[in-house]
Amino acid sequence: MKTLNLAITSMLACVAMPLSAQDGQSPDQSGPPPGVESGQGGPPPGVRDGENVFEGDWLTVGVGAGYSTSYSGSNDYVVIPAPVIQGRLGGIGISPQPAGIALDLTPEAPRGQADFAIGPSVRFRNDRANRIEDNVVKLAGELDTAFEVGIAASYSLSGVLGRNDSLSFDLGASWDVAGAHDGMVVQPSIGYSRPLSRGTFMSLSVSAEFVDDSFADYYYSVSPAQSAASGLPEFSADGGLKSLGVSLLSVFDLDGNALNGGWSAVSITGYSRLVGDAKDTPYTSLRGDPNQYFIALGMAYTF
């Protein structure tokens, strides 16, 4: 996870499925949905019978602000904008990615059943391309922005510990096609999500990021020219496990019912730890910190 910039975008991809599951139950589930007492008939207050914004086509758009490190391995923090778009239009799922987007080209599974999703993904990676707060690191020179094209896959199970929760296993792989790092990135993650009520949702995710030699050399090596310009010692970086991370997403629907769409508030907190050469590089070990923190707040509208 790149300093948990995955936060306000990629984590929102967990929201729709468990929330939409609250208006119905699979055959092996019993009892009323959260917030509806046993014996009550009809929909909950404020919800028309059969109303569920997540049935059929739907779209969530939003914007937020995150407080994150200025580059992967930095100990300087900056405020960054975080727009987001997610939904399902014409049978194609749209999921936010860090500085990018992924599409789901597979049919949506019936509610309560395991779901597999796969499709293309794209993202921009502007690590050390701007926002370098450390003057020594800045002397080493700015890097080019990478444009990564890849594939994202997810397998989700519902009703793991409760009738409306879900457990997802995600795997993404991408390659730079813009001539920046010219490398490959692989990102596996596991997420557990559950609604606490009709208007409150939380999701916990743990993830890792693996990179190849080309990626590691571009971002973490210190070349003789960079050493001469900055005074940092020369360093040669190899690929492998780059980071481990954990993040918590909270979504609060402003009218207390997520099924009718509308406005919601989103908060995300996260932590990642750089390992291997991403931790040992002078950009991190001498000028930064392998411990990377993230916090974000945002607003989103679903229709």
Image (spheres, grey):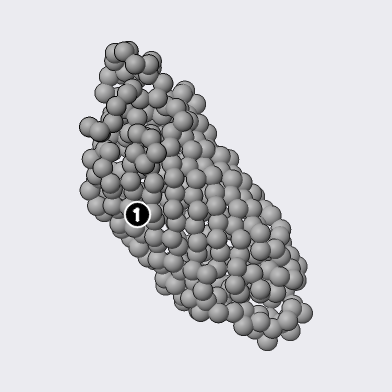
Near-viewer residue (5 or 112): 112
Residue at point 38% right, 54% down? 169
- When asked about the image quadrant of residue 274, the answer is bottom right
Quadrant assignment for the C terminus? top left
* Residue designated by label 1: 154
Q: Is residue 64 above or below residue 120?
A: above
Q: Could you tell me how many numbered marks the image carries?
A: 1
How far from the left and from the top, in percent, is residue 151? 35, 63
- When asked about the image quadrant of residue 217, the answer is bottom right
- Horizontally, residue 128 falls left or right of residue 255, namely right
User: Residue reaching furthest top?
Assistant: 40
Residue at point 49% right, 57% down? 207
- Horizontally, residue 227 falls left or right of residue 6, namely right
- Horizontally, residue 233 falls left or right of residue 153, namely right
Near-viewer residue (226 or 28): 28
How far from the left and from the top, in percent, is residue 291? 66, 59
Helix, strand or loop for disc 1: strand
Q: Is residue 43 above or below residue 239?
A: above
Q: Is residue 170 above or below residue 52?
A: below
Work out whether residue 84 can be spotted.
Answer: no
Near-viewer residue (133 or 6): 6
Q: Amino acid at mark 1?
A: Ser
Residue at point 62% right, 83% down? 236
